[in-house]
Amino acid sequence: MKPVIIIGAGGHALVVADALQAAGVNVLGFTDADPAKHQLRQCGLPVLGSDATVLTGYSQGDVLLANGVGGVKGTDVRRALQMRLQELGWRFITVLHPTAIVSRHASVGSGAQLLAGSIVQAAAMIGEGAIVNTGAIVEHDTDVGDYVHVAPRALLCGAVKVGKYSHIGAGAIVRQGICLGQHTMVGAGAVVVKDFDGGGDLVGMPARHVKGIA
């Protein structure tokens, strides 16, 4: 296994670092655009500098990258970062915490992150760059699109389809068979009981469209 550099040094990056360390991966440190973080240590690892500066010291064959950007209000920043670096030839590691339970019959896309206590059941599909965060559950036959973030303790019941670039908030529940369009933002604790193919912002029990999630 090649060593890994984590892009970003915020809260999500710490969780990613911990997951990689728990899996026995050699993590060299973090990058971050904020100069105030440079030379700090987090999870026992250094913040090495900005990604533009740090990555000039390596070739694409020397190291793998991990996406340390989370995103509570959307997945656009995370997606843009990863796609930009991939277009330059960098490869992102798939992060699998040792306590994640992933069916051997599930499919996990490259660069996805399955964090502590998450569960991915048989015939589920996790897209490229997606996050199944702490304690989240993705049930059988569910399709989680590219760069979707399933936040901590969220539950996607069987045969749910979540379109690309969506965010399922902490503790949210999506009933079996529901289809959510691309760029859907489901608020924390919401309960989704009908399809929302057009995406948008959903809150409440049962979930309804709103103008924006604060």
Image (cartoon, rainbow, N blue to C red):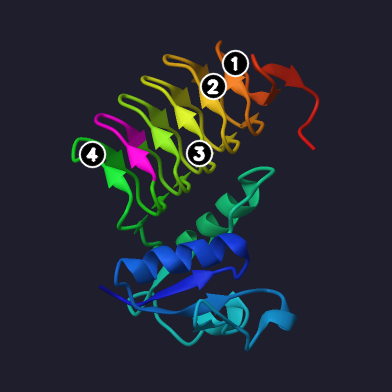
Residue at coordinates 59% horizontally, 77% vertically from top-left?
52
Which class describes the residues within 10 Å of circle 2: few (<14), some (14-19), or many (20+)? Answer: many
Which class describes the residues within 10 Å of circle 1: few (<14), some (14-19), or many (20+)? Answer: many
Task: Give the image quarter of residue 161.
Answer: top left
Element under disc 2: strand
| Residue range corresponding to the magenta coloring | 118-125
Location of mark 2 (residue): 180
Location of mark 4 (residue): 103
User: Camera-side residue: 70 or 157?
Assistant: 157
Location of mark 1 (residue): 196
- In three-dimensional space, the C-alpha distance between marks 3 and 4, rounded to whole angstroms, equals 18 Å
- In three-dimensional space, the C-alpha distance between marks 2 and 3, rounded to whole angstroms, equals 18 Å
Q: Is residue 119 magenta?
A: yes
Task: Give the image quarter of residue 106.
Answer: top left
Which class describes the residues within 10 Å of circle 3: few (<14), some (14-19), or many (20+)? Answer: many
Location of mark 3 (residue): 153
Q: Is residue 163 magenta?
A: no
Q: Tag 4 or tag 3, which sits nearer the N-term?
A: 4
Q: Tag 3 or tag 2, which sits nearer the N-term?
A: 3
Element under disc 3: loop
